[in-house]
Amino acid sequence: MPRPSLTVLLSLILVPLSVEARQATDLTVQTPQSTVSQDLKRLSIEELAELDVTSVSRRIERLSQVAAAVSLIRQEDLRRTGVTTLAEAMRLADALDVARFDGSTWNITARGFNIVTANKLLVLMDGRTLYSPLYAGTFWDVQDTVLADIDRIEVIRGPGGTIWGANAVNGVINIITKDASQTRGTHVLLTAGNENQLTTTLRHGGRLRGDGNYRIFGKYRNAGANKFADGASASNPLQLGLMGFRLDSNARRASRWSLQGTAYRGSEGFVDRDDADVNGGFLQGQWSHRFSPNADLRVGAYYDYTYRRVPLQFEEGRHTVDVDAQHHVLLGARHDLVFGGELRVTTARDVGSAVLFFDPDEQTNYVGGMFVQDEIALDPRRVFLTIGSKFEGNDYTGIDIQPTVRLRVSPSDRQTIWGAISRAVRLPTRVDTAIRLLDPASGRVVIRGNEDFLSESVVAYEGGYRIRPSSRFSIDVAGFANRYDHIRSQEFPSSFGPVILLGNTIDAVTSGVETAGTVQILDRWRVHASYSYLWKELTADPGSRDVSRGANEANDPPFLVSIRSYLDLPHGLAFDGMFRHVDRRPNPIVPAYSSLDLRLGWTVRPGWELSLVGQNLFDPSHPEFGAPTPRRHEFERGVYVRSTWHF
């Protein structure tokens, strides 16, 4: 009997396939925010280097001085590149591999291990965890908000387990929205085009009668159908509507509170069946108190509900409750200490189909632990040592320890040298432990999860150098060498007979370099470019029965290139562009491709901007991920117009 692959299994669960594709398959079978919103328009390169980031250490640090590989996606970047979704916005981060599988599925990773269900990157919004315990990845199709309300997106490449815990293996993305005091007035957006057919946004904010500010918003998005490689329509339009609110107390008080919530509902089309249904929402609250300039406390909690139903394949309803607290204190002149804890409980009911089921179909899991991290000023002006660890328990593997040691040296105000050694883990998931894939002809199990599945782990060695040789030029270089253990494998045959049992017998080593630079060519013209190179080798433990040697766990291009250009023209005009080149993917093969996006913007009058945006302008269509079959999705050239009003 032909041997089914795990890639096929995950696609059956998480990536809806056409009937034809399924038949062919069967044959192969929280962060603290800055207290002041950052005005990101028309900043000099030196001012950009002084911007605050909070996701590296859960405290405010200057971007130029963090001991990690970090890139910042600013509100100005979102506006000037013309991106329409959060997933698309991730293309603006340095050295991030962002690929579309189909109209609703995005595969986003840092430093390798990209698959249809990428699972080694932790994604947060205002500190709320967005990854799914179903497979440890992110359903990007339902992650949305008003893009104009985003203050910044902080992207950390490299392990973040010491601060953020499990699943921050290769990086952390933290989407940080604006305080309600920064969104007073009315914002209206209307976008219309061929690919991005319609996006409408309405948001209004103001002062509360008592103490604080508010905003309420609604958004609707309708993306058109993609095409298959054979030219046929994929008949997969996506519609998503959401509404929400945010309340914030007065920022000048010692004690502050924030409350926000969002509800969404959407549908995703198919060529061969009824639409999929996605809906959910969350309610999140935070409270903080500043005891003194040297000490503060923050407590947060949220409830999150998600529901996803794909006809003929899969249905899940999930409830998650999370509570966390952290304390930040300066001890004397040399110690900057952050410590805290978190407990997250999630309950899900997963209903299968004729080709798969879960055993058990309903399960409650918990993750909880404590962390501590101390930055020690060895030389109060130049040399800083950071040590810390997270001690985290879960009901799959018990206790995981995720330590880090970081050293930062600043020879001058314009230079930073840093190095780090860290460990992080990816926890087992429902897919790893409870999945059962059936042969539709015989009804017997052909792939099964493993109740003894171990945590995947990485030990990462990193280093970097940042320098601003002049007020018009900056460069940032980072290198890494990582060792991975217990990566998911497919053991065949297993102790259960002619059944593939998921295991942990694959190891890997990776190394690479990432570089980014910004140059202010003219006062009105700025260019930012990045390049990354990745090398990896996967091996199997002695006695492993995985003949693929882990090939299904990574499909990465050796290098990525990105260039962004922002040019201000007279009479309120702006001409902006973004070029990307993605090298060839090896397994399954996806040809290398280049893309060009252009935007012509016109500020008609203060508060009103018109834009004409073209995307993927180099070719009529191209694939970005997936096996080279006639039913591989391709993404077409797109043009849309956008009108934005603020009043």
Image: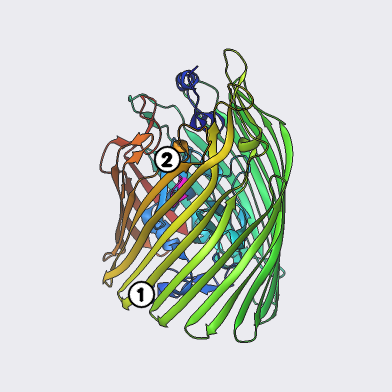
**Residue found 56% across the figure and 58% down from its top:** 423
When the figure is inspected, residue 580 is found, relative to residue 524, above or below; the finding is above
Percent of width and height locating residue 509 = 44, 51
When the figure is inspected, residue 376 is found, relative to residue 239, above or below; the finding is below
Q: How many marks?
A: 2
How busy is the neighbourhood of tag 2: few (under 14 within 10 Å), some, or many (20 plus)? many
When the figure is inspected, residue 429 is found, relative to residue 647, above or below; the finding is above
Percent of width and height locating residue 522 = 25, 71
Percent of width and height locating residue 128 = 63, 55
**Residue found 47% across the figure and 18% down from its top:** 27
Of residues 325 and 435, which is closer to you in this image? 435
Measured in 3D between alpha carbons, the distance from the residue under mark 1 to the one under mark 2, in whole angstroms, is: 34 Å
Percent of width and height locating residue 115 = 46, 40
How busy is the neighbourhood of tag 1: few (under 14 within 10 Å), some, or many (20 plus)? many
Of residues 171 and 647, which is closer to you in this image? 171
Q: Secondary structure at mark 1?
A: strand
Residue occupied by mark 1: 467
Q: Is residue 123 left or right of residue 412?
A: right
Q: Which residues are magenta?
A: 108-113
Q: Is residue 95 visible?
A: no
**Residue found 62% across the figure and 18% down from its top:** 444
Q: Is residue 180 left or right of residue 575?
A: right
Q: Secondary structure at mark 2?
A: strand
Asked whether the beta carbons under mark 1 and mark 2 sit within 8 Å of each other, the answer is no
Residue occupied by mark 2: 100
